[in-house]
């Protein structure tokens, strides 16, 4: 089991009191593609960040189990975490604009990522970087390697981020809203690319998104989160026959090109769901 | 009564404009109260302002009364901080000097802050040629060393408190203008300003009612942090004989006249020096604390 | 209020971002502009609102050419709702103050009354009136932004991606609200979005933009049926069809 989370709770202390944001989440992930879907504030990103120990130190994290490949994250030292983060588990964030260094060429950044984990000469690293850029289906990898982040489009930037994450051959890829800053046409390409790479390399994928139908196209299983709880976990192919009223409500309230609705059904939230 | 006010001000659903405004200020005050350095700064400033206002009541001697027989006396029960070279009571002069020094600082701020704010916001909002002209003028003033420009200005007029205030004001506004301009540039293109343009209101209305209030918190912070340097400039002008003139007991002038016997009768220079030090420090503490509580993201 | 846009060209410096766009909107109709980022769709909308002065061509409301610098009365007729409800409200002003600005500028009477009415029109509680934007949720803020536009009692509402920053459940509420308001007040809408489903939900006619050109104008019905001509329209349509259904 690559990821094993049992009864995870995450809270924040503030001047006005204690705020519990994640309230007992349990998830398991092997070499498969799991989507975590929820609205803003559902706790989906916090869950992924807790797994990589990326939350601020004043965050209160409790869990019966919080493991990555058998390593207990709760007690892991910062040194141990560094061997996991970026090396065994890659993290792709929403906007590549903020994740790439603006004053270094793309090639040198990918090469640096490769060298950090694999060592070797600068020349070899640059060749490896160009090879990686090719793997993320960049048509002219040499040209892109020589350009700076502001010279490429958002979709291209996200491909570069993925290439950097792939450098150390990670076992797990966590993608937090990897395409919500991108256009629809590019979004599909990037998700398809992630899906292919994950399948080819036998990695685990944790795809976090607010778009339920979209995620179901690229994942095996989907966990639907609401207000810090997992409402329902189901196979992506079973989404149309989802049982939980929240999942059904989310699917119903979207406007549709093919099935026009006179009025959109409004999601009524039942306090019972949180019990 | 106190609890009623608290509940009324902190009501999550205020029912009038007044209640909402009070609630906002009360929350800022609650945040500020939690900042111990800021509270120390505020207390020190309040004490000094109180001393300046009530100087006639607190003083033990007439600050101008000379007693040449008892000059340069060490601190004693009669003269708490000793006497200066003309036998005047340093404690009483310090109290009255607070009036002059703090008065100068406040006069400078009242002159400078609105001018800097207005010039910066106008330059930032309109951009283009207006921006170029206003900012080059700002640059000209910024290019001169502060004290040198102030000295030249005072020399051209006549030495005295009023000239010193004008001189310091003349050299103090450019940084505020630059700061207000930078702040304006960050909000000028935002959607909420675009929405105000869609009301049909004039540019002046947008600048003065919607942009300027956004720059005020940063300005207040900058001003409190600059207070100490204004005090020091005022003191330096006094020290160089270009500020307050004798027998006016301005703190800088007091140090200036005491420089001749700084090794023998050190307290004559040290006492006003300590006063300047405390007020400057207090303004710095206050400025740091205000920066924390007035930041909109902090609330 | 009819809207006529004829050969509209807009430049930022030397770069032309809208390269001759023309379309007409009938009174009470709703027109959608769909396109990807950088297609120039929002720029068209901002020029219509009078927020951009570097354009050429013709923008006319009710047959009258809009001048380069719009007179204040123009904003009683045409209002706009922005994309990001977090960035479109003044962070240091109460909702009351935000809503009262336009009535004050135009010297309208009974401002208190008008604010109360417009708050209930967008289904916000009266208690929201003296709160600050940061105390409201994203959906509530977007309702405030709509209320701010409505208080002018406009005839045309320009909508710049009004729901793309919101969760889908909130999006549904806002889209319903916009549909109701249009019916009640006989408003004319021009809406910009990158989402075909959202556009076709609210608009009966859609213009597709790419690289500063409006390459196709098609009814929502034809778009649904696939009666489209341009390759880009077809691409957007097939993506939307494929991705909106769960796997």
Image (cartoon, coloured by chain):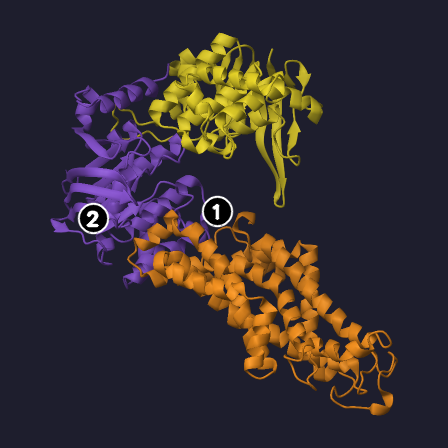
Chain colours: A yellow, B orange, C purple
Image: B55 above or below A71: below
Q: Secondary structure at mark 2?
A: loop
Q: Check chain identity for marks 2 and 1: say if they share one.
A: yes
Image: A260 above or below B160: above
Q: Secondary structure at mark 1?
A: helix
Verify CB contact (< 8 Å) between mark 2 and mark 1: no
| Crowd rating for badge 1 (residues with CA inside 10 Å; few <14, some 14–19, many 20+) | few
Looking at the rendering, which quadrant does residue B29 occupy?
bottom right
Q: Position of residue B184 (x, y in %)?
A: 44, 55
Q: Position of residue B221 (x, y in %)?
A: 58, 59
Q: Looking at the image, is mark 2 or mark 1 earlier in the sequence?
A: 1
Q: Is residue A207 visible?
A: no
Image: A65 above or below C190: above
- Left or right, residue A142 beside residue B26: left
Q: Chain under label 2?
A: C
Q: Position of residue A112 (x, y in %)?
A: 57, 24
Which labelled disc corresponds to residue C135? 1
Q: Is residue C62 visible?
A: yes
Q: In the rendered image, which quarter contains the C terminus of chain C?
A: top left
- Left or right, residue B241 beside residue A235: right
| Crowd rating for badge 2 (residues with CA inside 10 Å; few <14, some 14–19, many 20+) | many
Q: Chain under label 1?
A: C
Which labelled disc corresponds to residue C155? 2
Which labelled disc corresponds to residue A89? none
Q: Nearer the viewer, residue C195 or C128?
A: C195
| Alpha carbon distance from label 2 to label 1 | 30 Å
Q: Nearer the viewer, residue C158 or A274?
A: C158
Q: Residue at x 68, y 74 (%)?
A: B50
């Amino acid at each position: 089991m690559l990821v094993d989370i049992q009864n995870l709770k995450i809270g924040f202390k503030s001047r006005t009191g204690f705020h519990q944001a994640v309230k007992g989440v349990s998830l398991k992930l092997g070499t498969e593609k799991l989507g975590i879907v929820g609205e803003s504030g559902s706790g989906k990103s916090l869950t992924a960040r807790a797994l990589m120990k990326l939350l601020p130190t004043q965050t209160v994290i409790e869990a019966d189990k919080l493991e990555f490949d058998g390593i207990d994250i709760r007690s892991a030292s910062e040194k141990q975490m560094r061997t996991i983060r970026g090396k065994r588990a890659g993290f792709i964030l929403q906007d590549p604009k903020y994740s790439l260094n603006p004053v270094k060429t793309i090639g040198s950044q990918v090469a640096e990522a490769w060298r950090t984990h694999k060592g070797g000469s600068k020349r070899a690293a640059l060749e490896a970087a160009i090879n990686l850029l090719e793997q993320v289906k960049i048509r002219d990898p040499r040209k892109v390697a020589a350009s700076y982040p502001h010279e490429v489009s958002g979709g291209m930037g996200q491909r570069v981020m993925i290439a950097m994450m792939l450098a150390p051959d990670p076992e797990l890829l966590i993608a937090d809203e990897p395409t919500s800053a991108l256009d629809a046409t590019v979004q599909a390409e990037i998700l398809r690319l992630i899906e292919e790479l994950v399948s080819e390399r036998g990695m685990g994928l944790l795809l976090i998104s607010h778009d339920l139908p979209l995620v179901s196209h690229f994942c095996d299983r989907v966990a639907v989160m609401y207000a810090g709880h997992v409402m329902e976990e189901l196979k992506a192919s079973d989404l149309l026959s989802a049982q939980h009223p929240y999942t059904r409500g989310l699917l119903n309230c979207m406007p549709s090109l093919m099935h026009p609705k006179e009025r959109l059904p409004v999601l009524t939230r039942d306090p019972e769901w949180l019990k | 009564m106190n609890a009623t006010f608290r509940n009324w001000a902190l009501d999550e659903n205020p029912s009038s404009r007044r209640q909402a405004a009070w609630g906002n200020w009360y929350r800022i005050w609650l945040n500020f109260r939690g900042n111990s350095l800021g509270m120390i700064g505020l207390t020190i400033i309040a004490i000094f302002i109180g001393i300046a206002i009530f100087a006639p009541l607190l003083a033990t001697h007439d600050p101008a009364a000379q007693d040449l027989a008892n000059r340069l006396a060490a601190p004693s029960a009669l003269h708490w901080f000793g006497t200066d070279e003309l036998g005047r009571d340093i404690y009483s002069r310090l109290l009255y000097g607070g009036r002059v020094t703090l008065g100068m600082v406040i006069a400078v701020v009242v002159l400078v802050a609105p001018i800097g704010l207005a010039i910066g916001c106008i330059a930032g909002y309109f951009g283009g040629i207006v921006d170029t002209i206003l900012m080059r003028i700002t640059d000209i003033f910024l290019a001169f060393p502060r004290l040198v420009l102030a000295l030249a200005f005072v020399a051209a007029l006549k030495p005295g408190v009023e000239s010193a205030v004008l001189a310091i004001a003349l050299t103090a506004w450019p940084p505020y203008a630059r700061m207000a301009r930078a702040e304006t540039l960050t909000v000028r293109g935002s959607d909420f300003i675009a929405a105000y343009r869609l009301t049909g209101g004039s540019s002046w209305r947008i600048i003065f009612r919607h942009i300027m209030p956004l720059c005020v918190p940063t300005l207040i912070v900058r001003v409190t942090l600059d207070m100490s340097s204004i005090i020091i400039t005022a003191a330096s002008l006094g020290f160089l004989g270009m500020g307050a003139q004798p027998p006016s007991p301005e703190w800088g002038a007091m140090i200036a006249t005491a420089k001749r016997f700084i090794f023998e009768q050190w307290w004559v220079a040290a006492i006003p020096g300590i006063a300047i030090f405390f007020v400057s420090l207090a303004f710095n503490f206050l400025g740091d604390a205000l920066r924390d509580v007035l930041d909109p993201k902090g609330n | 209020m009819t809207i006529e846009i004829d050969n509209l060209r807009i430049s930022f410096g030397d770069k032309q971002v809208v390269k001759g766009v023309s379309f007409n909107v009938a009174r009470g109709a709703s027109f959608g502009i769909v396109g990807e980022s950088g297609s120039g769709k929002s720029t068209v909308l901002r020029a219509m609102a009078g927020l951009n002065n570097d354009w050429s061509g013709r923008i006319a409301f009710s047959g009258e050419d809009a001048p380069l610098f719009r007179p204040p009365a123009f904003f009683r007729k045409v209002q706009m709702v922005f994309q990001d409800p977090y960035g479109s409200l003044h962070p240091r002003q109460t909702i009351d103050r935000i809503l009262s600005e336009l009535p004050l500028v135009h010297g309208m009477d009974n401002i208190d009354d008008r604010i109360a009415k417009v708050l209930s029109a967008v289904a916000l509680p009266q208690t929201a009136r003296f709160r600050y934007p940061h105390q409201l949720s994203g959906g509530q803020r977007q309702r405030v932004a709509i209320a701010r536009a409505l208080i002018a009692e406009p005839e045309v509402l320009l909508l710049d991606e009004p729901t793309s920053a919101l969760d889908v459940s909130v999006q549904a509420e806002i889209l319903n609200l916009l549909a109701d308001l249009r019916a009640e007040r006989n408003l004319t809408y021009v809406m910009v979005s990158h989402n075909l489903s959202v556009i076709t939900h609210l608009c009966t006619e859609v213009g597709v933009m790419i690289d500063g050109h409006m390459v196709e104008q098609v009814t929502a019905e034809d778009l649904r049926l696939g009666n489209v001509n341009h390759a880009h329209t077809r691409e957007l349509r097939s993506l939307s069809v494929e991705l909106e259904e769960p796997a």
